[in-house]
């Protein structure tokens, strides 16, 4: 067995174990930490594939941003272990299964089409994982998806702004109280 | 020998680096206490050894022999993991910093800049997890403050890094130091340095932005429930972070290992880097001795309403400069 295969198996096993930990642990913060471990092992796998830029992006975006936000939210709303109110709603099980099936189909579809179609193109694009190659591909060949995602993020940003904005007159109560003092 | 180059030499370099950094930490505490004492017209530590030089060793022995207390109400695995998670990023960020001509501390990767951004991104985990796992309101408040503060200040910090990157044109920090920079680029960089330094102060939770551990409102913030060596690990993390960020600032803004004759005599490189790092550490202590702590909302407002627009403008102008003048 070659060293690289052994390394891959080792990292892959940690990654799988972490993924199992995400869905099996009862404590939301522990789940988030397992998710972090999973993202970290994925970054390691990207490095073994010579995709250094992807590895760095993986850590910056997922480990440095998203999991921190997840932890932040869990802490703010108080992630109690016995609080399964969301899971007790009648429709949540159906929706969960439906979403799971959709995910499974999408993943297997992309995996199967990968097996049949050529992958050299993307592999060549990410060769050496240089930021230059990724950037050039992103802003020439994939510029439409890129701009669409930018639009999506903008919409999400505006949505958060609308939700987070104080309701008309909500702040006035406190202001009038202060004025009366 | 392939495995020798791949495994053994980097491992030895990493061990030496860790030894140097931890010794540096020990004497940074001495340096800070002595300097603060000077600023406040006191003597500072002067009992253990000449000029108190053995004080760090005495402190280390004290921390080692303290009783290890783990409170009953904590989330044990996370509580024990947090101090380690706080220290590791402070050490590994050094891997890409060049210490002499053509020599990075560990590895010259083509994503040096991104490595710094990535490690800066995971730096807040130790503090957040410490605060949460302690199961204590003061700790949690400290952790929430720190995560909000670090995530916010990461944005202008990242944008300043991107501007330097646009002007440098290379992701490798080794190239960044060695490549020629025209005079206007230096001036443009130095204009950004004060703002970059402010972001670094917030990122490392240093005074005046040490709000996650304000003792007059949050006991000791995120580290309230930690004692002995576990507390010492947070302490080490903060100080090693100061050294690491100073080295990064020296590399980005002041030419890193460069100095007179450093090209001919390679051993001069680390010495020049050390001088620049010590000067920047002096700046850290100087700021701590001079400036009071702002309120928390002022800190956040300053980031979102001043630093972020400023850094966005800086990126735009840097891009224009890079296109027209380079």
Image (cartoon, coloured by chain):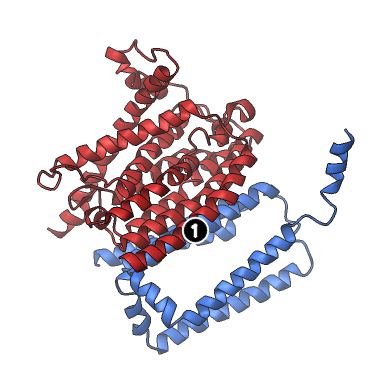
Quadrant containing the C terminus of chain B in the rendered view? bottom left
| Residue B243, x across and y down, in percent | 35, 37
Q: Quadrant of residue A9?
A: bottom left
Q: Is any atom of residue A13 visible in this view?
A: no
Extreme residue in the bottom direction? A116
Q: Quadrant of residue B174?
A: bottom left
Q: Nearer the viewer, residue B213 or A172?
A: A172
| Residue B184, x across and y down, in percent | 32, 55
- Residue located 36% across and 59% down the image: B165
> Looking at the picture, does residue B123 appear above or below residue A149?
above
> Looking at the picture, does residue A154 appear above or below residue B81?
below
Relative side of B286 to B104, left or right: right
Relative side of B326 to B195, left or right: left
Residue annotated with mark 1: B313
Q: Is any atom of residue A163 visible in this view?
A: yes
Chain B shade: red
- Residue located 72% across and 69% down the image: A93
> Looking at the picture, does residue B61 appear above or below residue A35?
above
Mark 1 falls on what kind of element? helix
Q: Nearer the viewer, residue A132 or B240?
A: A132
Chain A shade: blue
- Residue located 29% across and 55% down the image: B173
Extreme residue in the left direction? B264
Q: Nearer the viewer, residue A103 or B314?
A: B314
**Dot 1 surroundings within 10 Å: few (below 14), some, or many (20 or more)?**
few
Q: Chain of mark 1?
A: B
């Amino acid at each position: 067995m070659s060293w690289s295969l052994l390394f891959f198996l080792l990292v892959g096993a940690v990654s799988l174990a972490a993924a199992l930990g995400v869905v099996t642990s009862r404590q939301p913060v522990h789940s988030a930490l397992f998710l972090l471990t999973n993202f970290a092992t994925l970054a390691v796998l990207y490095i073994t594939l010579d995709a250094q830029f992807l590895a760095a992006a993986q850590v910056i975006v997922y480990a440095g941003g998203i999991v921190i936000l997840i932890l932040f939210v869990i802490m703010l709303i108080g992630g109690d272990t016995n609080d399964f109110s969301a899971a007790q709603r009648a429709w949540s099980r159906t929706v969960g299964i439906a979403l799971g099936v959709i995910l499974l189909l999408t993943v297997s579809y992309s995996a199967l089409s990968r097996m049949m179609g050529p992958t050299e193109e993307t592999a060549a694009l990410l060769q050496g994982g240089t930021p230059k190659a990724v950037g050039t591909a992103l802003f020439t060949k994939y510029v439409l998806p890129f701009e669409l995602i930018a639009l999506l993020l903008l919409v999400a940003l505006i949505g958060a702004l609308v939700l987070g904005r104080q309701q008309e007159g909500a702040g006035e109560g406190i202001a009038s109280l202060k004025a009366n003092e | 020998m392939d495995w020798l180059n791949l495994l053994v030499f980097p491992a030895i370099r990493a061990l030496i680096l860790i030894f140097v950094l931890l010794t540096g930490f020990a004497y940074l505490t001495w340096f800070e206490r002595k300097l603060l004492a000077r600023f406040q017209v006191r003597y500072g530590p002067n009992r253990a050894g000449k000029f108190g030089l053995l004080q760090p060793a005495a402190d280390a022995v004290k921390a080692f022999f303290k009783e290890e207390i783990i409170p009953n109400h904590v989330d044990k695995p996370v509580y024990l993991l947090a101090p380690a998670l706080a220290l590791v990023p402070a050490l590994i960020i050094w891997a890409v910093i060049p210490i002499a001509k053509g020599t990075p501390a560990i590895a010259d990767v083509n994503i040096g800049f991104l490595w710094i951004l990535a490690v800066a991104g995971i730096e807040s985990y130790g503090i957040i997890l410490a605060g949460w796992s302690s199961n204590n309101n003061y700790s949690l408040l400290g952790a929430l403050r720190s995560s909000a503060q670090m995530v916010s200040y990461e944005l202008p910090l990242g944008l300043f890094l991107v501007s330097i990157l646009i002007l440098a044109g290379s992701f490798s920090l080794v190239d960044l130091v060695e490549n020629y920079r025209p005079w206007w680029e230096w001036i443009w960089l130095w204009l950004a340095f004060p703002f970059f330094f402010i972001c670094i102060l917030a990122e490392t939770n240093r005074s005046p932005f040490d709000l996650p551990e304000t003792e007059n409102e949050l006991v000791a913030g995120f580290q309230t429930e930690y004692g002995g060596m576990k507390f010492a690990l947070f302490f080490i993390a903060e100080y090693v972070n100061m050294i690491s960020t100073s080295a990064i600032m020296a590399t980005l803004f002041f030419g890193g290992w460069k100095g007179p004759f450093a090209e001919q005599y390679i051993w001069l490189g680390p010495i020049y880097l050390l001088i620049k790092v010590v000067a920047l550490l002096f700046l850290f202590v100087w700021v701590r001795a001079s400036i009071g702590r702002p309120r928390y909302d002022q800190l956040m407002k300053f980031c979102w309403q001043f630093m972020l627009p400023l850094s966005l403008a800086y990126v735009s102008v840097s891009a224009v400069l890079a296109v027209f003048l380079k």
